Structures are given as C-alpha cells and as structure tokens.
Image (tube, helix red, strand yellow):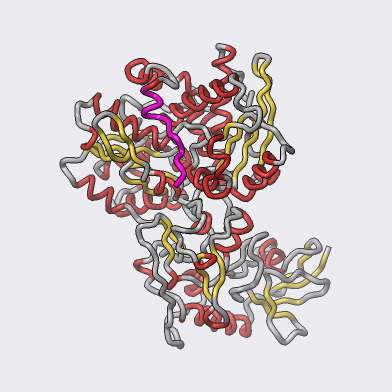
Amino acid sequence: MVNLIIDGKKISVEENTTIMEAAEQNGIPIPRLCYLKGLNEIAACRVCVVEMEGKEKLITSCNNVVEEGMVLYTNSPKVRRHRRTTVELILSQHNNQCVICSRSGNCSLQKVANDLNILELPYKQTPEKQEWNKEFPLIRDSSKCIKCMRCIQVCDKVQSLNVWDLEGTGSRTTVNVSRRQKIEEAPCSLCGQCITHCPVGALSERDDTELVWDAIADPEKIVVVQVAPAVRASWGEQLGLSPEEAKVGKILDSLKRMGADYVFDTAFSADLTIMEEASEFLERFTAGELKERPMFTSCCPGWVRFVKSQFPHMVKDLSTAKSPQQMFGAVMKSYFAESIGVSPEKIFSVSVMPCLAKKSEREMELFYGEYAGHETDVVITTRELVKMIRSAHIKPDTLDDIPGDNPMSVGTGAGIIFGATGGVMEAALRTAYFTLKKENPPAGTFKQVRSTGFQENNGIQEAEFDIDGVKVRTAVVSGLGNTRELLKKIERKEVQYDFVEVMACPGGCVGGGGQLIHDGKELAFERGKNLYYLDDRSEVRCSHDNPDIKKLYAEYLEKPLSHKAHLLLHTEHQMT
C-alpha cells in the first residue's frame, strides 16, 4: 500500500493507482474533460491538474501514479487559477451557444465552467468551423470540439475503424475524418460510440423529431410508432424514473399523448425476426452450408455496415432475415394497413431506437404489391424521444403503463432480451430447441451465451449445446474491435462455429449510440441485466409461443420462410 495525503486527508491506496483514482476512492472528485479510463489517459485537457508539495509545476492526476509520502492539493489557489485559465482558453475556441446545444445540461465543459464560476471570457472567441453534410445520420459541429481526442480513441481502440484523426499542427491542430475523407466515404459503421463518449456537443445524431411532429400534425397520415427493447432500459434515466418505474407501457402512453395513432413494442417484431432467423439457421445448418463458416445474425445495422466495408467476402454468410425495425415497418405497410383498411402510403412508420445506424437502415426501400417506398419513415433515438417528451410538457410521474395496440400487442421475453448482447442468440436457440424437440427448453438452458460483465472475455462468449443429439457451436460478440479479432480467427480457422451473433456496440443495443449519455460511465451491462430481469418475469418467454405471431402467420404469412415471408421479411444484403 502507498500512503499519501490529499487535501489534508491521510489515505492509503494500492500501488500503481493514479492520483485521480486515489482521490475518487476517498470522496475527493477531480474535474476532467478528456479522461476515459483505459482509453484516453493522455492529459490533453490539463483540467485535472493538482499541486504537489515540493514541486513547482502542477501535475496531471489522470496519468500520474501515487508515490509514498506525496502531499497533494486538488483545489489550492494555484490549482484553481490554472484550471480557470485552462477552461477559459478552451471556451475561447468553443461555440458557447449552450441554449441551442443538444448537450445543454449534460455537458462536461458546461459543468466545469459553472463550477469554476466563469461568467465572462477574457479572450477573443475564435471557434473553428468545418463544413458537414447535415443529411448524414452522424453530425459533427467542429465549433464545439475541444480536441480531447476521445472520439479518436474510442473509434480506434474499441471499434477498430479509425474514422477520426488529428490534423494540422500547433494552434491549428484539430480533429477531422481521417485520411482527408468525407464522412460519407469513411468506413463509419454509425455505431455512435463517438457520440456517447464525447464530453460536449461536438458529435450528435441528426435530429429528426420535427419530422415526427409534422406527421402527427398531418391529418392525412396515420402515425404508427414502435419502441425497441433496449429503449426501456435507458429512457427513464434523465426523467427521474427508476428502472422499475420506466416501463415500456409508459413510453407508449407518452407517444399516445403526443398524438401517435398506434403504438407498439418492437419486442413483437423481434419475435418475428426470431421465427425467420431460427428457421433459416436450421435450414442452412441441416443442409450442410455452415461447415466452412457460420451464419451471422443480421439485425444490427452497425455490424452489417462494418462487414460490408471490412470483410465484404463474408456478407454472403449473413442471415437474410431483416432486422426487427425493418420487419415491423414491412408488416405495418402490408398486413396492418390491410387490417385497418387503408393504403400503405397513409401509414407513417416511426421507430424509437437506441441506435444511430438505424437512421441509415431506414433508407432501404420496400417494394410489395403496388407499394414502393420505405418500411420505416423516421427513426429517432432514445435521446430524441426524451426531448419529445419534454417538448410535449409531459410529466413522467403521470404516465400510465398501457399495452401496445392490436393486432401486435404481445412481445415475449425472448423479444425483450434482443437489446442485450447474447439476447438474439438465446432467443433463437430457444426456438431452434422447440423446433427440434417439440418442447420448450428449461429456464436457463442457454444462459452461457450471456455476457458475464462489460467487455469481459474481450466481448466474446462461446458456448456449445447439444439439442436432441445435434451439436450447435455458438459465439456471441459485441464491439467491432472484438468482432474484427473474432472474424480473423474464423478466417484462419482457429475457431469454428455454426451460429454467431454480432452487435456493433459493446454490451449490445443497451449500450447503443442513441442511448442516454452519462459521461465517463459504461452502463450497458447494468441495463442488460434489467432486460433479463424482465425476461425472467415474462408470461411468455419464447417467440414461437407469441399468440400475435401465430395469428400473423395463420392469417397472412403462412409459415416462416414462406414466399410471402421472403418478400416482406428477408433481404439480399446488397453491397453499396
């Protein structure tokens, strides 16, 4: 143990503990802007400096370890002067129009500046301004960038895509798309991890909320909204709701109050995805098509974008099943439109997703019968949903837990766990088990595919199951850096699987790029546990037991993998 004094408090910590960690462990917070544990410990912002007795220069606390006998001051007059000057200089190159910033009230720079009581700037403001395509789902405002380099580190070290890089030198140093590309040309997966790890409002999603308000106000439009499973694990965090209070039915109630005509839980179409994907897996498995390479899940558009740009020769190994978002939209503009007696053109399909890449996925077209258009008309993130709730002046504590509308009101536990890494695999295996054995698996049969902790085992869970004498080798991976390493092993034939689930975001959709932001915290694993809790308490836990799914097949789709199902629910994964 190392003994030292911080702000007059005698403390003991383990060796190799940083000064920042030692202070935090003893209830002494040190402000920071650029620091991300294990990813960005470069002291770029210089906000975390502390004073050390016997040393004239201040030292950074995020990347200096404690030493025996250190006497440190985290808030001395010298530290406060230096920290204040540093933040004033950062603000002089920052667009300070906080009122119209998407991160207002949830911005680390805003908080540090407020804590330091900075009320005016002694320096001339010279924010940088770069051109950006405002139609792209990912928006970058260079005038708000503080050059902390978090986006670079997350994209490089976690997602292995190297989309961002530094350019220029000296005072002209800035962050931009790497290799002088435009963002549309870069291999961006639209995972959105750069957004959720940005401490300010320099990175955000394209805001599409006004498109939803316009549709609600249009008397010619029938607005139908779906809410993804992972959204229920995050939306209440900034509205003062506990996980137990933040039920999906309350989201549905909020959407109804805003003016949506029909509201649904995407757990229903997650069940539909499982019916098609599990059936496809068994068909390809029994036909011997998976001996060389496994079938990969295809419900994560960030992963689909990644494999198309990084491993294009593996695109043919993707499941042809569309994502739950796409299947919901396709069913809305066919089965549902027919059931309520309107043309599909009148249906305005909105999805609330924890994901940025879903905004790109909605660009895919649907051609069915006489209809030619999009399955989904608008995608909003969890963050945009919360903005709409606040914009509508809805008090969260007045919301009721209402059911989804008929004829797609039921979602199973299997559909709910889609939002956590391993959830798609477990849901598919439950239905594959039933298909082979004609009985449901005992509870917990496939728990081996669940993550044991955030980024545990390099984000990979391997499991092998014997189902009625049939051996099925599976792998679950989340995070694109982890995915790249797994795909390389598959290519080198170091590992062999039959079925692989991939999620672009570490921890799965619960850690998606559209979820609520808590600076410096990784909440995917905790949110995932909430979804598994809901699954454990669901009356129906297998997709094939969903009565609304059975009705849909009986009345419209006939059976999984039918001709009509292929037309509506499957895709060919065209290279773009």
Query: Which range of residues does the magenta coloring cover?
Result: 564-576
Residue 539 can be seen, yes or no:
no
Q: Determine if the magenta segment contains residue 573.
A: yes
Residue, x 31% and y 43% (percent of image)?
377
Question: Eyeballing the image, is 361 above or below 181?
Answer: above
Q: Quadrant of residue 358?
A: top left
Question: Eyeballing the image, is 220 above or below 292?
Answer: below
Position of 65 with respect to 550 (left or right) is right
Residue, x 75% and y 84% (percent of image)?
55
Horizontal and vertical percent position of residue 325: 40, 37
Tally the marks. 0
Horizontal and vertical percent position of residue 101: 38, 65
Residue, x 44% and y 70% (percent of image)?
142
Residue at the left extreme, as displayed: 219
Residue 464 can be seen, yes or no:
yes
Q: Quadrant of the N terminus?
A: bottom right
Horizontal and vertical percent position of residue 73: 68, 77
Closer to us: 527 or 242: 527
Horizontal and vertical percent position of residue 247: 43, 38
Position of 550 with respect to 263 (left or right) is right
Q: Determine if the magenta segment contains residue 218.
A: no
Position of 430 with respect to 275 (left or right) is right
Residue at the top extreme, as displayed: 438
Residue, x 69% and y 64% (percent of image)?
21
Question: Eyeballing the image, is 261 above or below 81?
Answer: above
